Image (spheres, helix red, strand yellow):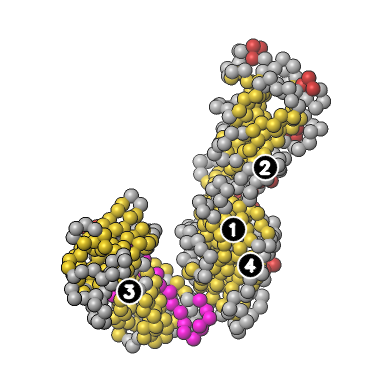
C-alpha cells in the first residue's frame, strides 16, 4: 500500500526516472557535486556509465529532504544564521507555527503597518478565574512562536505604538525554551523568563538575549495594563550555526538489484563539529510505513499521500519499513575519502544516503561531493558466516569462512573472495567447494586483508557451499570478518558484499563476528625478539625488536616505548605516538639519547598505553652483550 515519497528539496527527477534509459553498463558511478573535479579514472572505459549531478538541482516531488543547509556550487554545509535577518515571517515554511490565531497576522508578518491590539487587562478584575493572572502577567497578553527547529536566539525586537505612542508596550517578559503543551490555542505566561523589561518608552525596543542552549519556542508576555497596547511587530534574530543540518538523498531507483561498491567524498569536518555520512538500501521505493487510527482503538496502514491528507488526530504515526529496508548504517569514518565500502545490504534495487552536520559553536563542516559506485551483482544472493565465533585474544587460531551463493540465470558468477578485518590474518590454509578441496591462489595476504581466487562458480553451482580456511589473531572483542566476492573477468565492476547469516548447518554461529573469551580481553600483549642482542654493528642481532599488540580499543591510544637501566634512569625513548588496534614492532639499537652505545648489561623496557579511563604498562628485561 506504500506510495512514493514526496518530500525532497533536491534531486533531478528526470535522471531518477530515466536512469537506465540507455544500454546497461558494467559499472555505474554517480557523483553529487564536484563538477569542477576531474572525472573518475574509470570514466571513458567501455561499459562505464558516469553521471554528474549538482547539489543545487532540485525537484519538489521526489523522495529526500534538505534541512537548514547552505548549498552552492562548491558543496553543502550547515546554515549559519544571519544575525540581521528576522526569521519570524517565514517560520511556517520551515515547519514552525504561530500559536495564537488572533496574533498571527499582526506581529509575525514582517509588516509594521498591521498590529495586534492588546486590550486593557487588569488582574484585579479577573481574580475569580483560576490562573487568570500569574504575577502581573495575564493569559490574554502572550504572543508565541514555535520555530520549527533549534535556534540560538541573539535578540528580540518589539515594535509598538506606531499609530499612537501612548499605546507603546511598557512592561514585558521574554521566555525561550522547548515547545510547551498548548490547549485550545491558549499559552499562559511561562516561567522562568530569560529577560524582563520594565518602564519601556521605546517604540522600537531591541532586547539582547543572554547566552543559552538552542531553543525552539519564544514567548513575549505582556504585563497587566490599564490602557490598550498596540504591538506592531515582534522580530526574532538568531546567530551561529544551526543546531543540526541534514541532507537526505532521494531514494535512488536503479531499476534492478545492484551491488554497492565504494562510497567516496570530499569534505571538511571542523574541530569540535561532526559530519555523519550514512547509507541504507531497500527493496521498494519508500522506507516508511504510514498508519491511520481506525477509531476503534486500532490502526491500519495507508499510503504516503493518504497520510498527508489525514487530520492531526487521525494520524497514528510513521514507522520504519523493517520488511523492505535496512536501518541507516553506522556513520562512516569521516575523511577526505579515497573510498570506503558501502556496508548497506546488497544486491538491492533502491539506495539512499544521508549527511548530518552537527556544528558546535563556530565549528561547522562541509561536503564537496559524494560519489557512489554500483554494478550488477555477480550473484543474486550471498550468505556467509565465520567459525568459530569465539577465540583467545591475540592468539593465532584457525577459522573457516563459509559462503553459500544463490546464482540465477544471467548472473556472472565469481571466482574471488576477499576478507577484511581488524584481526591479523597470517595464512590461507585451504579452499573447499562442495566439501571438495580445490586449487586456489592467494591474490593478497596483508595483516588485515586476504584475497583468494579459485575455480569460478556459475549458475550450475548455485547453493554450493564454499569454505575458506585461514589463520588469524583476533585483537578485539566482536572482531568482524567482512567478505566480498568478484569476477576476475570483470575487473572494473565493484565487488559484491556478503550478507551475514546461516550459510550452513555445519556451523552454529550464523554471524561474521568473533568474540574473545572474557578472561582474555586484555589491552596489551608484548613479546621481545631476541631477548639477548649484540649492538656491535657486525650485522647480526644489532637490534632488539620490541613487539606489542594493542587490543580491545575503538580509537587511537597514546603509546610510549622506553628503555631504562637498573638504577631507574631512562636510557632511551624508543617511540612515542598514537597507535590504533593492531600489531607493532619498535626497534632499539642499543644506543642512548646521545646516540652512544650503552654498556653491556641488563636493561628494562617499558611500554605504556594510555586510553580513555585506563592506563596499561608492561615491563620486561633486555640483555645487551658484545
Marks 2/3 in contact by CB < 8 Å: the verdict is no
Residue lying at 60% horizontally and 36% vertically, measured from the top left: 217
Where residue 623 appears, as percent x and y from the top left, is: 18, 69
Marks 4/1 in contact by CB < 8 Å: the verdict is no
For the residue carrying disc 2, how many other residues have a C-alpha within 10 Å: few (<14), some (14-19), or many (20+)? some
Figure check: 298 above or below 605: above
Magenta part of the protein: which range?
A: 471-494
Image quarter where the C terminus lies is: bottom left
Residue lying at 59% horizontally and 75% vertically, measured from the top left: 40
| Nearest to viewer (mark 1 / mark 3) | 1
Is residue 169 found left or right of 464 in the rendered image?
Answer: right
Residue tagged 1: 366
Figure check: 218 above or below 511: above
Q: Which mark is residue 34?
A: 4
The question of residue 163 being in magenta is answered with: no
Separation of marks 2 and 1 at Cα, in angstroms = 21 Å
Q: Is mark 3 on a helix, strand or loop?
A: strand
Figure check: 230 above or below 271: above
Residue lying at 39% horizontally and 58% vertically, measured from the top left: 555
User: Toward the viewer: 346 or 472?
Assistant: 472
The question of residue 479 being in magenta is answered with: yes
Q: Which mark is residue 176?
A: none
For the residue carrying disc 4, how many other residues have a C-alpha within 10 Å: few (<14), some (14-19), or many (20+)? many
Figure check: 216 above or below 305: above
Decide which of tag 4 and tag 1 comes sooner along the chain: 4
Picture quadrant where residue 82 is located: top right
Separation of marks 2 and 4 at Cα, in angstroms = 30 Å
Residue tagged 2: 83
Decide which of tag 2 and tag 4 comes sooner along the chain: 4
Amino acid at each position: 500500500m506504500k506510495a512514493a515519497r514526496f518530500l525532497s528539496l533536491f534531486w533531478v527527477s528526470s535522471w531518477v526516472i530515466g536512469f537506465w534509459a540507455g544500454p546497461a553498463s558494467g559499472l555505474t558511478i554517480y557523483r553529487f557535486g564536484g563538477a569542477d573535479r576531474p572525472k573518475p579514472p574509470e570514466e571513458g572505459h567501455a561499459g562505464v556509465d558516469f553521471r554528474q549531478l549538482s547539489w543545487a538541482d532540485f525537484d519538489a516531488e521526489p523522495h529526500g529532504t534538505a534541512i537548514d543547509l547552505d548549498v552552492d556550487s562548491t558543496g553543502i554545509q550547515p546554515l549559519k544564521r544571519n544575525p540581521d535577518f528576522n526569521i519570524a515571517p517565514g517560520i511556517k515554511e520551515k515547519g514552525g507555527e504561530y500559536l495564537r490565531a488572533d496574533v498571527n497576522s499582526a506581529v509575525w508578518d514582517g509588516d509594521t503597518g498591521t498590529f495586534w491590539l492588546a486590550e486593557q487587562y487588569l488582574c484585579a478584575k479577573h481574580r475569580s478565574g483560576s490562573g487568570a493572572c500569574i504575577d502581573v502577567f495575564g493569559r490574554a497578553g502572550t504572543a508565541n512562536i514555535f520555530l520549527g527547529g533549534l535556534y540560538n536566539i541573539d535578540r528580540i525586537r518589539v515594535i509598538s505604538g506606531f499609530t499612537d505612542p501612548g499605546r507603546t508596550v511598557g512592561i514585558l517578559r521574554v521566555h525561550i525554551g522547548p515547545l510547551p503543551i498548548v490547549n485550545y490555542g491558549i499559552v499562559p505566561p511561562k516561567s522562568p523568563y530569560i529577560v524582563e523589561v520594565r518602564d519601556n518608552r521605546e517604540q522600537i525596543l531591541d532586547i539582547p538575549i543572554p547566552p543559552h542552549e538552542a531553543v525552539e519556542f519564544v514567548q513575549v508576555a505582556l504585563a497587566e495594563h490599564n490602557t490598550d497596547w498596540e504591538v506592531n511587530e515582534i522580530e526574532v534574530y538568531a546567530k551561529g550555526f544551526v543546531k543540526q543540518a541534514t541532507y537526505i538523498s532521494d531514494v535512488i531507483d536503479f531499476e534492478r538489484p545492484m551491488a554497492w561498491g565504494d562510497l567516496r567524498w570530499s569534505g571538511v569536518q571542523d574541530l569540535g563539529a561532526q559530519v555523519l555520512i550514512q547509507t541504507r538500501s531497500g527493496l521498494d521505493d519508500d522506507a516508511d510505513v504510514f498508519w491511520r487510527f481506525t477509531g476503534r482503538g486500532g490502526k491500519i496502514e495507508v499510503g504516503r499521500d493518504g497520510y498527508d491528507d489525514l487530520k492531526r488526530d487521525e494520524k497514528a504515526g510513521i514507522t520504519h519499513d523493517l520488511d523492505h529496508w535496512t536501518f541507516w548504517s553506522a556513520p562512516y569514518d569521516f575523511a577526505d575519502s579515497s573510498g570506503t565500502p558501502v556496508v548497506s545490504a546488497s544486491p538491492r534495487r533502491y539506495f539512499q544516503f544521508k549527511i548530518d552536520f552537527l556544528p558546535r559553536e563556530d565549528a561547522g563542516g562541509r561536503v564537496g561531493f559524494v560519489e557512489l559506485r554500483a554494478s550488477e551483482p555477480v550473484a543474486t544472493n550471498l550468505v556467509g558466516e565465520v567459525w568459530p565465533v569465539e577465540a583467545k585474544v591475540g592468539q593465532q587460531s584457525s577459522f573457516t569462512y563459509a559462503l553459500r551463493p544463490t546464482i540465477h540465470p544471467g548472473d556472472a558468477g565469481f571466482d574471488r573472495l576477499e576478507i577484511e578485518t581488524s584481526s591479523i590474518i597470517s595464512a590461507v590454509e585451504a579452499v573447499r567447494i562442495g566439501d571438495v578441496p580445490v586449487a586456489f591462489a592467494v591474490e593478497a595476504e596483508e595483516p588485515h586483508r586476504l584475497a583468494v581466487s579459485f575455480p569460478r562458480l556459475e549458475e550450475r553451482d548455485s547453493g554450493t557451499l564454499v569454505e575458506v580456511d585461514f589463520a588469524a589473531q583476533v585483537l578485539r572483542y566482536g572482531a568482524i570478518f567482512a567478505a566480498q566476492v568478484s569476477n576476475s573477468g570483470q575487473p572494473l565492476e565493484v565487488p559484491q558484499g556478503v550478507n551475514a547469516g546461516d550459510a550452513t548447518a555445519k556451523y552454529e554461529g550464523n554471524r561474521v563476528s568473533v568474540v574473545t573469551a572474557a578472561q582474555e580481553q586484555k589491552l596489551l600483549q608484548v613479546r621481545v625478539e631476541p631477548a639477548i642482542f649484540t649492538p656491535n654493528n657486525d650485522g647480526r642481532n644489532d637490534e632488539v625488536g620490541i613487539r606489542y599488540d594493542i587490543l580491545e580499543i575503538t580509537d587511537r591510544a597514546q603509546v610510549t616505548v622506553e628503555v631504562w637501566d637498573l638504577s631507574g634512569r631512562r636510557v632511551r625513548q624508543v617511540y612515542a605516538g598514537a597507535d590504533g588496534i593492531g600489531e607493532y614492532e619498535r626497534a632499539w639499537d642499543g644506543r642512548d639519547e646521545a646516540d652512544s652505545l650503552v654498556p653491556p648489561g641488563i636493561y628494562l623496557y617499558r611500554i605504556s598505553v594510555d586510553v580513555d579511563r585506563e592506563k596499561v604498562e608492561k615491563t620486561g628485561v633486555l640483555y645487551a652483550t658484545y
